Amino acid sequence: MWQPNRLEQERLIKVEQLEMRQVAPYPRRAERTHTTAAAITAFTALEGQNGAEAAEGLEVTVCGRIRRVNIKGKLSFLHIEDESGRLQLFLRIDNLDDSRYALVKDKLVEMDDFVQASGTMMRTKAGEPSVLVHDFKLLSKALSPLPVIKQATQEDGTVIEYGEFSDVEQRYRQRYADLAVNYDVREVFIKRAAVIRTLRRFLDDEGFLEVETPILQPVYGGAAARPFITHHNHLHQDLFLRISFELYLKRLLVGGYDAVYEIGRDFRNEGVSYKHNTEFTMLEFYKAYIDYRGVMSLTERMLAAAAAAVNGTTVVEFQGQTLNFAPPWPRMTIREAVKHFCEIDYMDYPDAPSLETAIRNMGDSIAPGQPWGKLVEHLLGEHVEPNLIQPTFITDYPRDISPFAKRVEYDDVHVERFEFYIAGMEMGNAFTELNDPRDQEQRFLEMAKLYRAEDDDATPLDEDYLRAMRYGMPPNGGFGMGVDRLVMLLTNQRSIRDVLLYPHLREEK
RNA sequence: GGCCCUGUAGCUCAAUUGGCAGAGCAGUUGACUCUUAAUCAAUUGGUUGUAGGUUCAAGUCCUACCAGGGUCACCA
């Protein structure tokens, strides 16, 4: 239940006063001929062509939220803001109906309200393009004032903000207020849209078909993660929120599409951190007749395109580091990488117990009884990953933790899989996809054995997926990437929460 | 889940280490026909996250809880 505070009570009284003066606080209709940016552009263009006097004949009707008020007796300045930017309204009692002007003078139309203003363009003595207002209309009364932030525009055009709205909890819980007062935040989500648009365009141009597959799945799979479980009442059936799209997308290659992709939400019932949110945006694609080397090439080019589209260059400044997305990216097998950063060749320890002992002897504390591949992965995550600042492919992962990848040619314990890392973060995962149904069934069974102890992460055997594969699946390369993390890199945001409009928070009490 | 830090006015922060809860901004009232962080004068505003406890006295110390951040654990 809303308990208006003092400031809000003042504004509620103003609504009554507005209604007494026959002014609707929330009228039905609005009109607009120009955005604020378009009004300024049109005005300065006319000045250039026909001179200052002619330009002042330009009539505009603009709309926006009042972000600055300066009442100087019989003369007032208001700045309104729409999505395109800010524009000054110049209100003079000489040019307005007295009762209209009084709405501003009496502060019934004030900070944070939405208004519509009509008038002619002009420059103030200070040279600022403004609207000499002949009439204006209240469009929406703000009952709660936004956090107070004042801005000063420097001579070089940079904007300094005085005061701030910085409490992260409030910013996330009331993202609307955050967006309304923090322009930088709005910019992040404009760039986010540009990233996703570019990924989509890149794949479309490469001949991929965009598809949508079920979010509610009867059998989850394609990754090792704890799912959210829900229930369909009429079908009396438990359903899982997907943890990946992988198995549904690869079925489509059986169906005859050569290349498919999906951008959508995955859900994982796990912890949150600066790079984990319970629901996150994933891009997966699968393309027939290429292997993981082909996927590496697509990866490099796609991310370079995304960086260029958002920031105009493949050089990315991220948290004090300079990252270069331009292809080709360095490639290193996981064995080479571990050798290089840990000075240990894990192939000297071919079974889990001996590798576990070796890792303990390095001084690492690890949970006992983990599969061999997970131990290798521990070495990677602990000692290699933090050092992988520039975009890097790490290739040829252990087979026992990669149930959907084809074996390498040179031995029986590695598979054609890569992950790529940027700024010390795992960004994505890709394979030469396994398309032998007999091998796939074996892998499912091996996984079931491997994870029996910790069955939270067990990948259930998907009979229908095997049935699809038995009809014949073309050889193909597949790819998955956390889109939010890419957005973090390209917008220089430290936390995944800053690239999600509504990050997951505990329930408000 | 463990450990550490934080929570004071609408926003951003103080409070001399246990001794009368304060400032700037915004709000209210007034002045001002070219301001732009407008200015000038006056002024309102608090259950110090919640609930207990110690004390003559608690924003400050203790306990529990709530929320957020960090970190570890977890996370193909």
Image: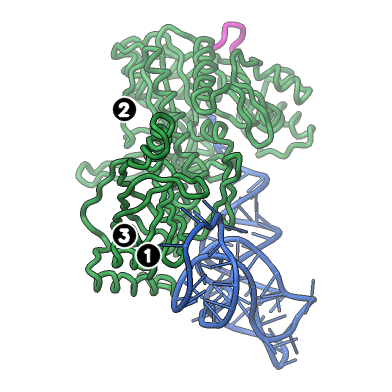
Chain colours: A green, B blue
Does the magenta run of residues contain A97?
Answer: no
Give the secondary structure at mark 3. loop
Q: Nearer the viewer, residue A347 or A107?
A: A107
In the image shown, does A104 or A133 lie closer to the viewer?
A: A133
Callout 2 amino acid: Glu
Q: Which residue sits at x=56%, y=15%?
A: A415
Tell me the amino acid under the disc marked 1.
Val
Query: Which tag is nearer the camera, tag 2 or tag 3?
Result: 3
Q: Earlier in the sequence, mark 1 or mark 3?
A: 3
Residue A370, numbered circle: none
Are the two marked residues, 1 and 2, in contact with CB atoms closer than 8 angstroms? Answer: no
Q: CA distance from mark 1 to mark 3?
A: 11 Å
Quarter where residue A143 is shown: bottom left
Q: Which sits earlier in the primary sequence, circle 2 or circle 3?
A: 3
Question: Numbered disc 1: what chain?
Answer: A
Q: CA distance from mark 1 to mark 2?
A: 52 Å
**Residue A500, position as x, y percentages in the image:** 47, 42
| Residue B14 in picture, x, y percent from top left | 70, 69
Same chain, labels 1 and 2? yes
Q: Chain of mark 2?
A: A
**Residue that label 1 marks:** A104
Residue A482 rendering spot, x and y as whole percentages: 49, 31
